[in-house]
Amino acid sequence: MDFNALLSSTFDIQLTDGQNQLFEEYHAYLASENKKMNLTAIEGREDVYIRHFFDSLSIASVTDLNDQSLLDVGSGAGFPGIPLKIVEPSLKLTIVESRLKRVRFLNRLVDQLGMDDVTIIRGRAEDLNRYASYDIVTARGVASLNILAEITMPWLKKGGLFIAMKSAGSDEEIEQAKKAIDVLGGEVKQIFPYHYDNVIDHVLVIIEKHKLSPPMYPRRYGKIKKEPL
């Protein structure tokens, strides 16, 4: 697998030597730390590069990240936020992760990769105190789309994008989320499919925010989950 060729042919992304080195360091550190804690069930260099790095970088192909502020919700071991920061160093990245061990891993990772303008927050997105602050919000399959919309969209600026990473065949889930998306001030702008062999078959659901979300949102997670919009 030629990672650079795959990125170029699929997403029109060309990595520099420095960026290639950062991905190598990321993979090595992830593999080392994964032996001590449960960061990812995906092991092996090629699987990590395809299922994590390639998957994450799909977002860089659908929107301009230059000098943008991005909130990555439920990032886990740093996906998609850290790979996006590698390919666009000017990105102002905030990661929200509820698990302390993973927050500690992310802080060490950011230091090791020498990254600036990265903020790691332990907590849940719905508990943030910065309303309508970000140009882009991302979430990688952490909940159904109608629930994700309420967790994420209030933190978007007017004109910002919520990009949800979903499996192919999510048409019904997307349709069911349209009410929530509308209530929260947005609409589905584009659905971008991408795949790699029989390993990746995903879509990006790109939602544009046209007006500010009503101030009563987001509700507490228990309420969101029990009574989704």
Image (spheres, rainbow, N blue to C red):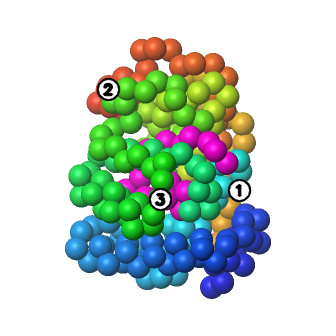
How many other residues sit within 10 Å of disc 2, few (<14), some (14-19) or many (≥20)? few
| Total tally of numbered discs in the picture | 3
* Residue 61: image tag: 1
Q: Horizontal placement of 229 versus 199: left or right? A: left
Q: What amino acid is found at the position of numbered circle 3 in the picture?
A: Met
Residue under the image location 29 percent in, 44 percent down: 122
Say which of marks 1 and 2 sits in front. 1
Q: Are marks 1 and 2 in contact (CB under 8 Å)?
A: no
Q: Which label's residue is closer to the chain start, 2 or 3?
A: 3
Magenta stretch in the rendered image: 66-85
Q: Which label's residue is closer to the chain start, 1 or 2?
A: 1
Residue 87, compared with residue 165, is above or below; it is below
Q: What amino acid is found at the position of numbered circle 1 in the picture?
A: Ser
Q: What amino acid is found at the position of numbered circle 2 in the picture?
A: Arg
Q: Could you tell me residue 163's position as x and y percent?
A: 59, 44
Q: Could you tell me residue 127's position as x and y percent?
A: 33, 30
Asked whether residue 195 is drawn in magenta, I would say no
Residue 2, compared with residue 195, is above or below; it is below
Say which of marks 1 and 3 sits in front. 3
Q: Quadrant of residue 3?
A: bottom right
Q: Which residue position holds label 3?
A: 115
Q: Secondary structure at mark 1?
A: helix
Q: Is residue 142 visible?
A: no
Q: Secondary structure at mark 2?
A: loop
Q: Could you tell me residue 12's position as x and y percent?
A: 76, 65
Q: Quadrant of residue 220?
A: top left
Q: Which residue position holds label 2?
A: 220
Say which of marks 2 and 3 sits in front. 3
Q: Which label's residue is closer to the chain start, 1 or 3?
A: 1
Nearest to the observer: residue 221 or residue 228: 221
